[in-house]
Image (cartoon, rainbow, N blue to C red):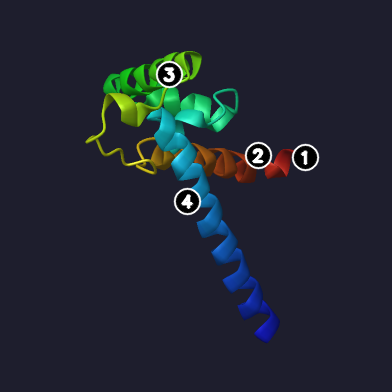
Amino acid sequence: MALRMFNEKATGFVAKMYQRTLGNQLQQYGLRYEDILNEDEAPIKQALELADPEVLIGRQRRVKRAIDLNFKRKNFQDYAPNMEIDIFKSELYDDVQKVKAREQEIALLNAHNK
């Protein structure tokens, strides 16, 4: 019991440090966490297909801007110092969860075929 509590606290501490570090790196280029998800994974690919066109356009523009800023070796805050970005805003995560749940349901329904 005590070991589990210690493990949860240590994991939570490390996760918060990682999130803070990742957030700082993403903020340098004006990206969100969902912008760096691997598009080749099936659930993410399907969630992107189901997403609103505005979400896809915003994602595409942020990625292009990040590539441009990286090429120029500039920081996003140099161009928009007063702009606040919600780095961990979730627009695709709900769709990814639905796709994964659907895949699990299909696997359970087809389990009798094996």
Nearer to me, 39 or 84: 84
Q: Which circle, 2 or 3, is nearer the viewer?
A: 3
Q: Is residue 38 left or right of residue 67?
A: right
User: Helix, strand, or loop for circle 4?
Assistant: helix
Residue in the image at 77% along x and 40% along y:
114
In three-dimensional space, the C-alpha distance between marks 4 and 3, rounded to whole angstroms, equals 21 Å
Residue bearing mark 2? 110
Residue in the image at 66% along x and 72% along y:
7
Residue bearing mark 4? 20
User: Helix, strand, or loop for circle 2?
Assistant: loop
**For marks 4 and 2 on the same chain, the one whose residue lies earlier in the sequence:** 4
Name the spot of residue 18 as percent of width and height, x first.
Answer: 55, 51
Type of the residue with mark 4? Arg
How many C-alpha atoms fall within 10 Å of the one at disc 3: few (<14), some, or many (≥20)?
some
The answer to whether any part of residue 1 appears in the image is no
Q: Is residue 11 left or right of residue 37?
A: right
How many C-alpha atoms fall within 10 Å of the one at disc 2: few (<14), some, or many (≥20)?
few
How many C-alpha atoms fall within 10 Å of the one at disc 1: few (<14), some, or many (≥20)?
few
**For marks 4 and 3 on the same chain, the one whose residue lies earlier in the sequence:** 4
